[in-house]
Image (tube, rainbow, N blue to C red):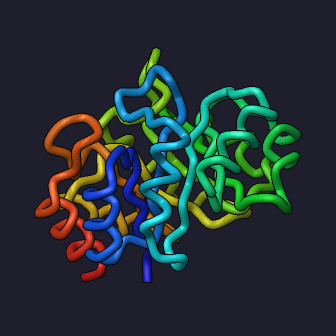
Amino acid sequence: MVKIKICGMTNKADAISASRLGADMLGFVFYKKSKRCVEAVVARDIISGLPASILKVGVFVDEEPGKVLDLAATASLDALQFHGSETPEYCASFRGKYKVIKAFRLKERKDLKDINDYGVDLYLLDTFKSGTAGGTGKAFDWKIVTDFEFLRPVILSGGLNPKNVSRAIREVVPYGVDVSTGVEESPGKKDPELMKKFIEEARKV
């Protein structure tokens, strides 16, 4: 069964709702330029009320390694998602301490050429948009990844919503799907009905 990650959590009510609806992973953004950025102490308070079974993922963009570890420890994270230009060596340095997810922003097939150089736990495929590290609300052309041999399980992201997630799963056959903008009322505030519908549609496939 496909795993479901809901990203951009900023408050306890949304996180608890996502948990009860059946999300497998929740994402907390620690990138200051993001509209969904959350302080580590706030994330820790939210995480303290969640089941141990849910993977708590911190999202970072080209952050200094020591600060990543400090924030991860403060917030009680399980996994680290790197969404910038981090190198394979940078990502590998966190293995053994946390699960590691490396995000790749895709525009065309050639953007996949270095992906298998990363010895991480999971790859996350997102949409490329100049000047934006993520959360674009736009889907990339899923044909880009057709027949590409990934050496790690893939989480599909970028422009997913309740209307297209089932088709995305059928076409890409990912390990997991990731949503943020597609289930929001406004940046950082989730819509419980949209989360419910998204999870229902993903589970149908």
Q: Quadrant of the N terminus?
A: bottom left
Q: Nearer the viewer, residue 23 or 135?
A: 23
**Count of marks overlaid on the render:** 0
Picture coordinates of residue 138 (x, y %)?
30, 37
Question: As drawn, is 79 to the left or to the right of 127?
Answer: right
The residue nearer to you, when weighing 89 against 17, is: 17
Q: Position of residue 195 (x, y in %)?
A: 22, 62
The picture places residue 161, in percent across and down from the top left corner, at 23, 54
Residue drawn at x 25%, y 82% is 204
Could you tell whether 150 is left or right of 142 in the image? Answer: right
Residue appearing at x 73%, y 40% in the figure: 70
Left or right? Give the position of 129 relative to 87.
left
Quadrant in the rendering for residue 57: bottom right
Quadrant in the rendering for residue 56 = bottom right
The image quarter in which residue 150 lies: bottom right
Is residue 186 positioned above or below 203 on the image? above
**Compared with residue 22, is residue 92 higher up or lower down, i.e. above or below?**
above
Q: Is residue 148 above or below residue 102?
A: below
Q: Residue at x 22, y 58 (%)?
A: 164
Choose between 139 and 12: the one closer to the eye: 12
Horizontal and vertical percent position of residue 8:
38, 45
Q: Quadrant of the C terminus?
A: bottom left
What residue is drawn where x is 48% and y is 48%? 43
Q: Nearer the viewer, residue 83 or 148?
A: 83
